[in-house]
Amino acid sequence: MSDDLKKLMEILSDPALNNSIRLGILLALFGLESINFSQLLKILNIPKSSLYTHLQVLEEGGYIRMTKKFTALGPRTFIEITEKGKEVMRQYLMLVNKMSDKK
C-alpha cells in the first residue's frame, strides 16, 4: 500500500470523517467558509434531523463550529469550518489529487 493511501486511510479512520455526508459537508464548507443550516439542508437534500446529527458529530470532532445568530428573518444557525477542518480537507484533497495524478 502506498504512503499516500495509508495517509488517506488514516484521515478516513476518524469516525467523524468516515461518512460521505460528513465529508460532503466539510467539502462544501471548505469552499464557502460559512453557511446557514437551511442552505446546507437544501444542498444536501437530507432530513433535518440527519443533518443536525452529522453536524453534531463534526462539531464534537472539532471540524466545524455552529453558532446561532439573529437575522432580519429570525434566528438562524450558521455553520463554519474550523482551522482543524480546513487542514484535514487540504490534506484529503491533496492526497486524492496525488493519487489520481499517478494514474
Image (tube, rainbow, N blue to C red):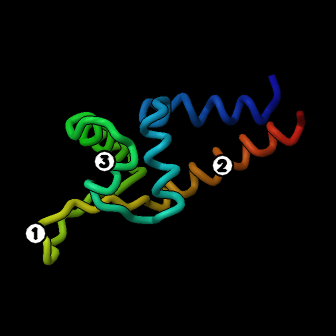
* Residue at x 81%, y 43% (from the top left corner): 98
**Callout 3, which amino acid?**
Leu
Query: Outermost residue, right direction?
Result: 102
**Callout 1, which amino acid?**
Gly
Residue nearest the observer in this picture, 41 or 98: 41
Question: In what quadrant of the picture does the N terminus appear?
Answer: top right
Percent of width and height locating residue 70: 14, 73
Is label 1 or label 2 in front?
1
* Residue at x 66%, y 35% (from the top left corner): 8
Q: Which residue is mark 3?
A: 41
**Label disc, if present, on residue 91 of the rendered structure:** 2
Q: Earlier in the sequence, mark 3 or mark 1?
A: 3
Q: Which residue is mark 1?
A: 74
Q: CA distance from mark 3 to mark 1?
A: 17 Å
Query: Outermost residue, left direction?
Result: 74
**Callout 2, which amino acid?**
Gln
